[in-house]
Image (tube, rainbow, N blue to C red):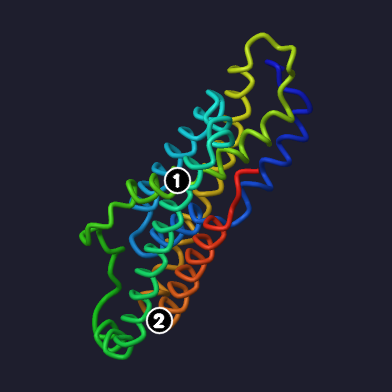
Amino acid sequence: MLGVTHYATYVLGALLIVLLPGPNSMYVLSVAARKGVRTGYRAAAGVFLGDTTLILLTSLGAASLLRATPLVFDVVKAIGACYLLWIGWNMLRSALALWRNRTTAVTAESASAPESPAPTTDGERPFRRALIISLLNPKAILFLLSFFVQFVDPSYGQPELSFTVLGATLQLFSFLYLSALILAGTTLANAFRRRRRLSATLTTGVGALFIGFAAKLATASAG
């Protein structure tokens, strides 16, 4: 089919890849839990655009450039690791503020009616942040290349169509998975607003994950 071989095997592998937790999915879940469905999808749109860009770069040979030029890989890797570290650190700071203010917040909220998810008024810009998180990961380009080429028929005359099929399949799974996370996040949002300790615990966990993602990216190699 359009130069794609063993498509059923690819579908299974792509599904498992999408289900693995990563900085993109964790950020979308966090945004949806804090700010609601609409803002969650804004973050998801940033992920989609970033992943689509990486797929296009992969098909155009950016992975070969990163592998052949270690300095370029190291620079992009360092920038990406620092950005993930910065996000994780800010989440830990937010969690600390929640821990300090949880008693006052619970008392104030118990006297008021449930509120709708908070609008994005803090300048976070979920779309842009999710896009940057997606793009500043050179390892993703190398991974996509090494994964995709296993299912592309080298004798097929139009490999760009093969990459399109593989990329579209991966993005479909990503959309379904992120939608599930967004809906789960908004379901939890009311509980988080009533229970600041739970919210602080989740924020702490996600912040620690981002610091872990930064460490993993910082130690990644191009090979």
Where on the picture, by quarter, is residue 70?
A: top right
- The amino acid pointed to by label 2 is Arg
Residue at 67% across, 31% down:
148
* Callout 2 secondary element: loop
Residue at 48% across, 66% down:
211
Which residue is denoted by mark 2 in the rendering?
Answer: 195
In the rendered view, does 100 fall on the left or right side of 180?
A: left
**Foreground label between 1 and 2:** 1
Where on the picture, by quarter, is residue 93?
A: bottom left
Classify 123 as above or below 112: above
Decide: few, some or many residues near mark 1? Use Cα within 10 Å; few <14, some 14-19, many ≥20: some
Quarter of the figure with the N terminus: top right
Q: Nearer the viewer, residue 176 or 31?
A: 31
- The amino acid pointed to by label 1 is Val
Q: Which of 215 and 122 is in front in this view?
A: 215
Q: Which mark is residue 76?
A: 1
Decide: few, some or many residues near mark 2? Use Cα within 10 Å; few <14, some 14-19, many ≥20: some
Q: How far across and how far down the image is residue 120, in percent?
A: 25, 57
Q: How far across and how far down the image is residue 6, in percent?
A: 79, 28
Q: Which mark is residue 117?
A: none
